[in-house]
Image (spheres, grey):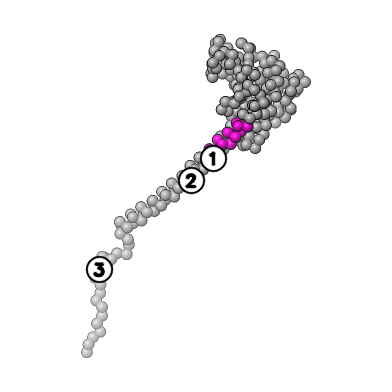
Amino acid sequence: MFGIKTPGRRSSKDEAEKPFWISFSDLMTALMVLFLVAMTVALLAITNEISESDRQKTQREEEIQKLMERMKEATKDFPGVIVNGHSVDFGDRARFDTNSHILTPDQGRLLRTFLPKVLDMTRDPLGQKWFKRVIVEGFADKRGTYLHNLNLSMQRSERVLCALLAKPERNESPLSGNDRLLVRELFLVGGSSFNSMKSSLEESRRIELKLEFLDIGESRSKSPDMPLDEEQYCPLD
């Protein structure tokens, strides 16, 4: 009789030549692919973040430029008042005498007439979004000592605020109560002794309003809610 032939048993050597696990080289290849995918995703995220930041910066610059164009338009009704960058220079319209911080009645009237143009800009939607504050910059010429002129330029800045915040019954063209409250909230004084000298001594004795704007993500600080002091007087007097 013929017997039943059974298949031969595979040797352990054949099984070893066909392992179940992937080779070490295949594993490294897979890890490299995963690394490249992760790096690509991370680079795309960073690129998108940079692009959004650049877009916000460009938008901020364009909107602030629109505000300054409106300010230039407003100065057309005030010959001699010009806009340089983010500053409003009153030129001959608010010139000081030598070693003096006194403003004439006409100069004070000019400041109170012009200032609502600035305040209107701060109330504009773009102004609400970007406007930070106004620095009243007083300047002195090169004569005299540094500290004397620094103090004099600070007094000239303070004199401007005195003219703006003075009691209505003492002035022509007074600011409204709301405008004076906004001046008190947004305006600061600054002084420059020998900085930003002009070509002549007379031109150096001037006043400028430096308009400052918020950075992206920055918010305007609020001053304490205090009533306007109607009994205030100018300390310089």
Please check the rendered image and state whether residue 112 is part of the magenta-colored stretch, yes or no.
no
> Pointer 2: what residue?
48
> Pointer 3: what residue?
14
Q: Is 102 located above or below residue 60 in the figure?
A: above
Residue 53 is situated, as x and y percent measured from the top left of the image, at: 51, 40
Question: Which SS class for mark 1?
Answer: helix
* Residue at x-position 53% and y-position 38%: 58
Question: Which SS class for mark 2?
Answer: helix
Observer-nearest of 215 and 11 = 215
Q: Quadrant of residue 149?
A: top right
Q: Quadrant of residue 169?
A: top right
* Residue at x-position 55% and y-position 17%: 198
Residue 131's label in the rendered image is none
Residue 56's label in the rendered image is 1
Specify which label sits upstream in the sequence, 2 or 1. Answer: 2
> Can you name the residue that lies furthest to the left here?
1
